[in-house]
Amino acid sequence: MSDTPELSPVGWVHDQTQKILDTGTTDSVGFDGMKVVLFTTTGAKSGKQRYVPLMRVEEGGKYAMVASKGGAPEHPSWYFNVKAHPEVLVQDGDSPIAMTAREVSGDERAHWWKLAVAAFPPYAEYQQKTDRQIPVFVLE
């Protein structure tokens, strides 16, 4: 396993993550006034740690990771990383904490999906763009 997490090669994701690292807090970035959380995952095949900034979906100290990939037909690569290695660092503000992710379904997924769409309304549009049900992980 790598000691230093890797930044995304995607320009805006890389820049957003770098700003969080430079300032030490997720409060330094956002999207149209909505907050972001920085997750650190472990690669399913490589074992390398990777940063994943996602929209902040939180309830009662639990967080959700929404594998939307903007409504693409396939899951984001980090989805497979979390399935293989559910231990994830979650940084909301300036202090990362270790949590365990689990994919949710049924009524629990419906609850978290509603919270996700409330936190970031474009998630509803992303779901309409794809035939796959967008996966949701809950971290606690």
Image (cartoon, rainbow, N blue to C red):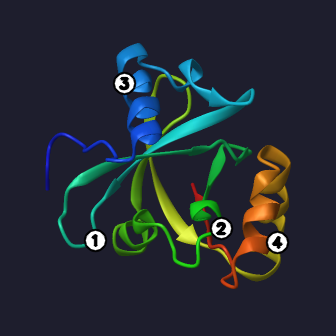
Q: Do the residues labelled 4 and 1 touch (CB within 8 Å)?
A: no
For the residue labelled by badge 2, is the local secondary structure a helix, a strand or a loop?
helix
| Residue occupying image coordinates x 27% and y 63% | 43
Residue 104, which numbered label?
A: none
Residue 21, which numbered label?
A: 3
Residue marked by disc 1: 44
What amino acid does circle 4 point to? Answer: Ala
Residue 103: x and y in percent read 58, 73
User: Dot 3 surroundings within 10 Å: few (below 14), some, or many (20 or more)?
Assistant: some
Residue 71, which numbered label?
A: 2
Which numbered disc, 4 or 1, marks the residue that appears first in the sequence?
Answer: 1
What amino acid does circle 3 point to? Answer: Leu
| Residue occupying image coordinates x 80% and y 62% | 125
Which numbered disc, 2 or 4, marks the residue that appears first in the sequence?
Answer: 2
User: Dot 4 surroundings within 10 Å: few (below 14), some, or many (20 or more)?
Assistant: few
For the residue labelled by badge 1, is the local secondary structure a helix, a strand or a loop?
loop
- From the viewer's perspective, is residue 10 above or below residue 27? below
Residue 112: x and y in percent read 77, 62
For the residue labelled by badge 4, is the local secondary structure a helix, a strand or a loop?
helix
- Tell me the CA gap for discs 2 and 1: 22 Å
